[in-house]
Every structure is written in structure tokens, then in C-alpha cells.
Amino acid sequence: MDELDTGVPIAIHLDTFITQEGEQSHFAFDEDGQLFQMGDSVYLRYQETDEHTKNEIPVTMKIDEDGDVLLTRAGENKLRLRFSDGKRIQARYRTPYGILPVDTVTPFLEIRMRDRPISGTVKVDYQLFAGESLLGDYKIRLQFTA
């Protein structure tokens, strides 16, 4: 995968399923992105369009060699969530009103990647907590192909 040093254009399909206070939501979108490798980590980068403001939000998903995933959204609300299978991890959600400490609990994490052709899936099921309060259950299903 030598071409990953400089980046490879990819097509991304993302489904996000959210359950909050008994209400369920589903968001799906298709975006162009880029896949590249730095060291032992693989990065997926794409722009997500905010459904309310229509602003482009840069999103990076870093996949570590050990299988952990770091999700970063750099819009008005900055979010960095780390997912590690079966673990609870502290994070911070930066809003215009201040920083909200949150925790992720990841009961399911699966990554599959192929290099011929370059393609893969990232599946993350996680719960988001503020202290001991459950904010919601989330499922991310991301597919990419070069």
C-alpha cells in the first residue's frame, strides 16, 4: 500500500444510528474522502455537511494498529472520541458554551480492510455518558472503497 503515504481518493458511505431518550434517528450520507497511512495508523478523512447550517465539518477517523479508533469532528462543536473494544474512555466535547466531559463505552468494534482493491468497513457501537448519565446509544457503519 505504498500509495497510502500520499493519500488515495475514496468513496465513503456512512450510516449513523442514534437512540436518545427512547427516540431513534438514522442519518446516512455518501461523501468523497481520502485514505492515507502515517506510521502504523490509517486515516480516513472526509467533509460532513451539517444538516442545520449546511457548513462543511472536517471529520477524521484514525485507525490504530491495535484496532482502536479515534474520531475527530472539527466543526463549531469540537469532538474527539476514542473507541476501544469493551473499554470506557474519557473524552471532551467542546461546545460554544464550554467543555463537556464525556465518556465512551464501546461494546462492539470491528474493522475490516483490504488492499486490492482498497476498501473496508468500520463498525462501532458505543454509548456516550456525561458522568453516570447515559446520553445515548450510537452505531456507526462506515464503508469505503477506492
Image: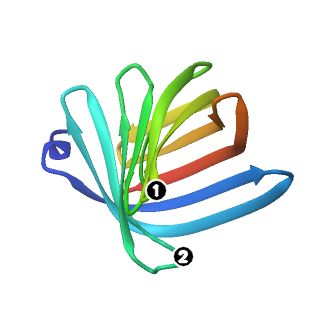
Q: Given the image, on which type of amino acid does mark 2 rest?
A: Glu
Of 67 and 51, nearer the camera is 51
Task: Name which quarter of the figure residue 103 lies in.
Answer: top right
Task: Name which quarter of the figure residue 61 lies in.
Answer: top left
Question: Taking 139 as reference, is 113 left or right?
Answer: left
Q: Position of residue 76 (x, y in %)?
A: 39, 63
Of 117 and 120, nearer the camera is 120
Q: Given the image, on which type of amino acid does mark 1 rest?
A: Tyr
Q: Is residue 83 visible?
A: no
Query: Which residue corresponds to the image point at 51% horizontal and 44% vertical from the top-left?
Result: 121
Residue at numbered disc 1: 97
Task: Name which quarter of the figure residue 54 lies in.
Answer: bottom left
Residue at numbered disc 2: 51
Q: Position of residue 143 (x, y in %)?
A: 51, 52
Question: Taking 103 as reference, is 98 left or right?
Answer: left
Counting residues from the start of the chain, the first of labels 1 and 2 encountered is 2
The answer to whether mark 1 and mark 2 are in CB contact below 8 A is no
The quarter in which the C terminus is drawn is bottom left
Rounded to the nearest angstrom, the CA distance separating label 1 from label 2 is 20 Å
Q: Using the image, determine if residue 65 lies above or below residue 97.
A: above
Callout 1: few (<14), some (14-19), or many (20+) C-alpha neighbours within 10 Å?
Answer: few
Question: Taking 105 as reference, is 51 left or right?
Answer: left
Q: What mark, if any, has residue 135 been given in the picture? A: none
Q: Position of residue 65 (x, y in %)?
A: 35, 23
Callout 2: few (<14), some (14-19), or many (20+) C-alpha neighbours within 10 Å?
Answer: few
Residue depth check, mark 1 versus mark 2: number of the one nearer the observer = 1
Q: Is residue 7 visible?
A: yes
The quarter in which the N terminus is drawn is top left
Question: Taking 116 as reference, is 22 left or right?
Answer: right
